[in-house]
Image: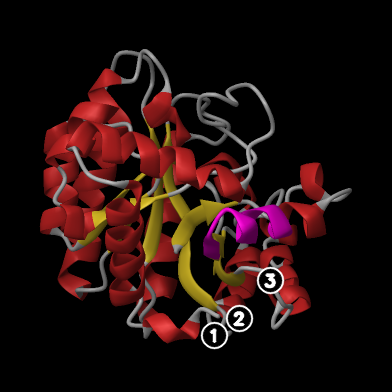
């Protein structure tokens, strides 16, 4: 049994074949997907929850849990209405995390100080609802600036709350992973772990304890080898599991069972919640 701990199932790129895509995921052994509720911005962050409810209970379809949050790209759109919407969404039982939130200094679609402010505001809302956070972090070229700022904020403002989180699509250095784990975070690896130039990511994946690791697709982005460049989908999380298994001298089943157990333990769910 596999869990795709980060996919954008509400992407318009799936509108034509979402049923078939979820069926392929089931056939590949994926029993649960965490659908990330950022939408195309704050106004559509509810769409992941709508999908979760639409597909709930369908046979041979992965169970869909949901997050909600304002991505750092759209931080400048996080007005009072957007934050109120996030507050409402985090009260829904299917919404198990706040995210993806964080800092992105690579594209700078929103001013960095605005990103930090909105990051902190969302931490406060998540803490009110006792929900963990899912972190997006991307530094500018040849820098760790966004990682340094993200982890400084987590250590100062989030770690004391004891709620933990997930570093999604980890691309940082070992010290970043270590600092995050010290704050109760899990480290999630995506399809880019299979890319030829991704040795630093593979090095981190060798060092992260198995009981602190998750795997994801970030679909529709970052399709793993051998499908690199195509539209990614949850079924291909098996390729991430295979690469982790290869570099750690494990079986795919080992990686699947550990990461599934980690997901349910972290979110305090019994494994039998997944059908």
What is the crowding at mark 2: few (fewer than 14 residues within 10 Å), some, or many (at least 20)?
some
- Which secondary structure is most common in the magenta stretch? helix
What is the crowding at mark 1: few (fewer than 14 residues within 10 Å), some, or many (at least 20)?
some
Q: Is residue 179 left or right of residue 73?
A: left
Q: CA distance from mark 2 to mark 1?
A: 5 Å
> Seen from this angle, which residue lies furthest right?
16
Q: CA distance from mark 3 to mark 1?
A: 28 Å
Q: Earlier in the sequence, mark 2 or mark 3?
A: 3
- Mark number, residue 202: none
Q: Earlier in the sequence, mark 3 or mark 1?
A: 3
Which residue shows up at 60% across the image and 56% down it?
78
Considering only vertical position in the picture, is 194 above or below 58? above
Considering only vertical position in the picture, is 186 above or below 275? above
Q: CA distance from mark 2 to mark 3?
A: 30 Å
Q: Is residue 158 magenta?
A: no
Q: Provide the residue span drawn in magenta.
A: 22-31
Which residue shows up at 68% across the image and 73% down it?
52
Asked whether the viewer can see residue 169, the reply is no
Q: Quadrant of the N terminus?
A: bottom left
| Residue topped by disc 3 | 60
Considering only vertical position in the picture, is 217 above or below 254? above
| Residue topped by disc 2 | 88
> Comparing marks 2 and 3, which lies closer to the viewer?
3
- Residue contact at pointers 3 and 1, CB within 8 angstroms: no
Which residue shows up at 33% across the image and 39% down it?
170
Q: How many marks?
A: 3
Q: Is residue 139 left or right of residue 209?
A: right
């Amino acid at each position: 049994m596999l869990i795709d701990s980060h996919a954008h199932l509400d992407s318009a790129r799936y509108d034509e074949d979402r049923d078939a895509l979820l069926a392929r995921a089931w056939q590949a052994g994926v029993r649960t997907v965490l659908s990330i509720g950022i939408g195309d911005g704050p106004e559509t962050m509810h769409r992941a929850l709508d999908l979760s409810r639409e597909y709930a209970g369908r046979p041979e379809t992965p169970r869909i849990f949901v997050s909600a949050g304002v991505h750092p790209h759209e931080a400048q759109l996080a007005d009072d209405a957007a934050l109120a919407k996030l507050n409402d969404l985090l009260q829904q039982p299917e919404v198990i995390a706040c995210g993806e939130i964080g800092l992105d200094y690579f594209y700078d679609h929103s001013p960095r100080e605005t990103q930090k402010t909105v990051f902190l505001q969302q931490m406060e809302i998540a803490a009110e609802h006792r929900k963990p956070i899912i972190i997006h972090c991307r530094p500018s070229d040849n820098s760790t600036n966004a990682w340094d700022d993200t982890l400084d904020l987590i250590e100062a403002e989030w770690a004391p709350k004891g709620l933990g989180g997930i570093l999604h699509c980890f691309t940082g250095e070992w010290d970043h992973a270590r600092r995050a784990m010290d704050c109760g975070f899990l480290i999630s690896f995506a399809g880019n772990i299979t890319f030829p130039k991704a040795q630093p990511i593979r090095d981190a994946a060798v060092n992260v304890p198995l009981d602190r690791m998750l795997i994801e697709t970030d679909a529709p982005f970052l399709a793993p080898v051998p499908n690199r460049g195509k539209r990614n989908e949850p079924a291909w999380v098996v390729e991430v599991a295979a690469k982790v298994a290869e570099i750690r001298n494990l079986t795919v089943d080992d990686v699947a069972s550990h990461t599934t157990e980690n997901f349910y333990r972290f979110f305090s769910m019994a494994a039998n919640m997944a059908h």
